[in-house]
Amino acid sequence: MSERLRHKTFTGVLVIAIIIIFNQFLFSAQWKRDTVGSGNGKMQHIAVGDGRNDGTNRIYIANDEGSMYEFSWVQGTGWKKVKMGDADVSAVAIAKGRNDSKNRVYVVEIPSKQLSEYSWNF
């Protein structure tokens, strides 16, 4: 076998090996689904953010039974659920609504059509 043919064969085998390895990493990645928790009823509205202004993002949800919940990830323990209150909600957002340095959780309540603000007292 000539040196040139040996080089082409080696290069071809190397390219095939690289493609196989690349495909293993590329196509073996997939989404993993974990259950965070249940807030009773049908979960309708969700927002994620630092609602307590402590540098930790949390998940805020409202259900069709008129309740608001906060889910926090606790390292080593898992998800912790806190009921925030009762409100029939059509939308949830987290923002610095007062243009100060503090995030608050804002909800639009049904049927009163009021905008309510939740602030964490620390």
Image: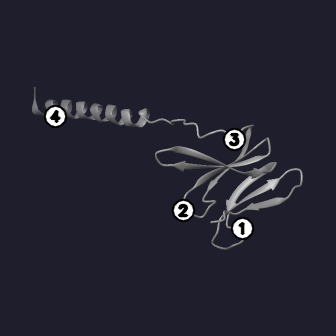
Q: Is residue 19 left or right of residue 77?
A: left
SS class, disc 1? loop
Other-residue count near label 3 (Cα within 10 Å), few / some / many at <14 / 14–19 / ≥20: many
Marker disc for residue 39? 3
Q: CA distance from mark 3 to mark 1?
A: 26 Å
Residue 49 in percent (x, y) is at 61, 57
Q: Residue at x 29, y 36 (%)?
A: 18
Q: Residue at x 33, y 31 (%)?
A: 20
Q: Residue furthest top?
A: 1
Say what amino acid the circle numbered 4 marks. Answer: His
Say what amino acid the circle numbered 2 marks. Answer: Gly
Which residue in the structure is indicated by mark 1? 97
Q: Residue at x 79, y 60 (%)?
A: 116
Which residue in the structure is indicated by mark 2? 55
Q: Residue furthest bottom?
A: 100
Which residue in the structure is indicated by mark 4? 7
Vertical side of 73 occupied by 99: above or below: below
Q: Quadrant of residue 97?
A: bottom right
Q: Quadrant of residue 38?
A: top right
